[in-house]
Image (cartoon, rainbow, N blue to C red):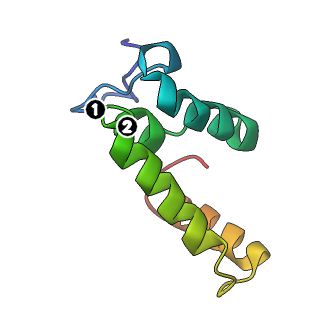
Amino acid sequence: MSPHSHGDCMPRIPPLDRDAAAPEVRVLFDQDAEAYGEALNTTRIAAYRPGIALAAKELGRAVANAGLIAAQLRLLINVHVARLVGCPF
């Protein structure tokens, strides 16, 4: 099985490893690893375009920090949606 495969599915764009990513986005890999134990696939795909990766993370932070949804509820929503789509979170 390929290191990038998930079951019998293969991503169309192979996720980048931290070492293959541009230096300016490696910090995003590190932040993901600290928060989630490993880099998220969204980070690993967006890293192909560093400007987009950095902007997307900043947008995500802005939404998360807006305070419109309590942190505990936001976490429960993330876990529930991940479960609905069959994604381990």
Quarter of the image with the N terminus is top left
In the picture, measured across the screen, residue 66 lies left or right of residue 42, that is right
Query: Which picture quadrant has residue 85?
Result: bottom left
Give the percent coordinates (x, y) of residue 21: 43, 22
Q: Do callouts 1 and 2 mark residues in contact (Cβ within 8 Å)? A: no
Element type where label 1 sits in the image: loop
The local crowd at label 2, few if under 14, some if 14 to 19, many if 20 or more residues have their Cα within 10 Å, is some
Residue at image position (72%, 78%) is 73
Residue at image position (51%, 53%) is 57
In the picture, measured across the screen, residue 32 lies left or right of residue 72, that is left
User: Which residue occupies the foreground of this view, 73 or 6?
Assistant: 73
Q: Read off the residue under disc 1.
A: 11
Q: Read off the residue under disc 2.
A: 50
Determine whether 43 is above or below 74 in the image.
Answer: above
Query: Given the image, on which type of amino acid does mark 1 rest?
Result: Pro
Query: Given the image, on which type of amino acid does mark 2 rest?
Result: Pro
Determine whether 68 is above or below 23 in the image.
Answer: below
The local crowd at label 1, few if under 14, some if 14 to 19, many if 20 or more residues have their Cα within 10 Å, is few
Seen as rendered, the residue at the extreme right is 72
Give the percent coordinates (x, y) of residue 71: 75, 74
Determine whether 72 is above or below 12 in the image.
Answer: below
